[in-house]
Amino acid sequence: MPNNIQISKVNVKDAATLLELSRTTFFDAFLHQNNPADMEAYAAAAFTLPKIQLELNNPDSEFYFALVGGAVAGYLKLNYNAAQTELKDAHAVEVERIYVLNSFQGQQVGKQLMEFAMQQATSRQLKYIWLGVWEHNTKAIGFYKIKGFGPFGSHNFMLGSDEQTDILMKKEL
């Protein structure tokens, strides 16, 4: 990993920073393609301090910050066992969130976070890593394909009042 990118585990004391980062990266990634009211409705439920604290306290979920030169550049959320949103497979890990701030795009931060996720899965001797990605997020889909992920299904995702489709992708380890 490049010397200027560090990955560190997020603790409950970092909840406010994680909350701000989560909102910022989510809106940066999707606002230009979605109705602002649907974005706000989703964020009002998903991105609250109590919700973030609950997720941080879940023993089957782990958050990690990517730091570039000491500055928080992005984050990763991994779900194991019952914390997984869908499959709940003890032999797998879900990458529920992987986001990089716009100002750090193109600096290999997402690549390093994904490689870190794969290292975590391999160290736990899991069989595969999986995720869901919005069908219209072509940049992310391309990134996951380069990393060896392939589609295996889909599910619906409610963004406010807008029902959207996520493509489920996985990579065998």
Image (cartoon, rainbow, N blue to C red):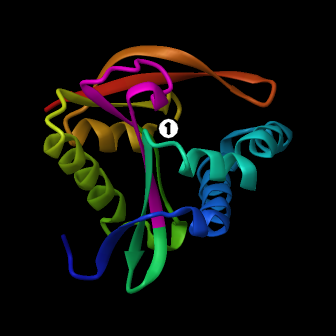
Residue 70 lies left or right of residue 122; in this view the side is right
Q: Position of residue 76 (x, y in %)?
A: 43, 53
The magenta stretch spans residue 75:
yes
> At x 40% / y 75%, what residue is drawn?
67
Residue 49 shows in this picture: yes
- Note whether 20 is above or below 34 in the view shown: below
Q: Is residue 125 above or below residue 114?
A: above
Residue 130 pos. (x, y %)? 33, 30
* Residue at left offset 42%, top offset 85%: 70
In the image: residue 26, left or right of residue 125: right
Q: Position of residue 56 (x, y in %)?
A: 55, 51
Left or right for 1, reference 33: left
Q: Mark 1 belongs to which amino acid?
A: Asn
Number of residue marks? 1
Q: Residue at image x 49%, y 74%? A: 72
Left or right for 149, reference 9 = left
Residue at which label 1 appears = 137
Is residue 48 visible in the rendered structure shown here?
Answer: no
On screen, residue 105 above or below 34:
below
Pick the residue in front: 153 or 123: 123
Q: Is residue 1 magenta?
A: no
Tell me the SS state at disc 1: loop
Range of the magenta residues?
Answer: 74-94
Nearer-the-camera pick, 139 or 113? 113
Residue drawn at (40%, 22%) of the image: 168
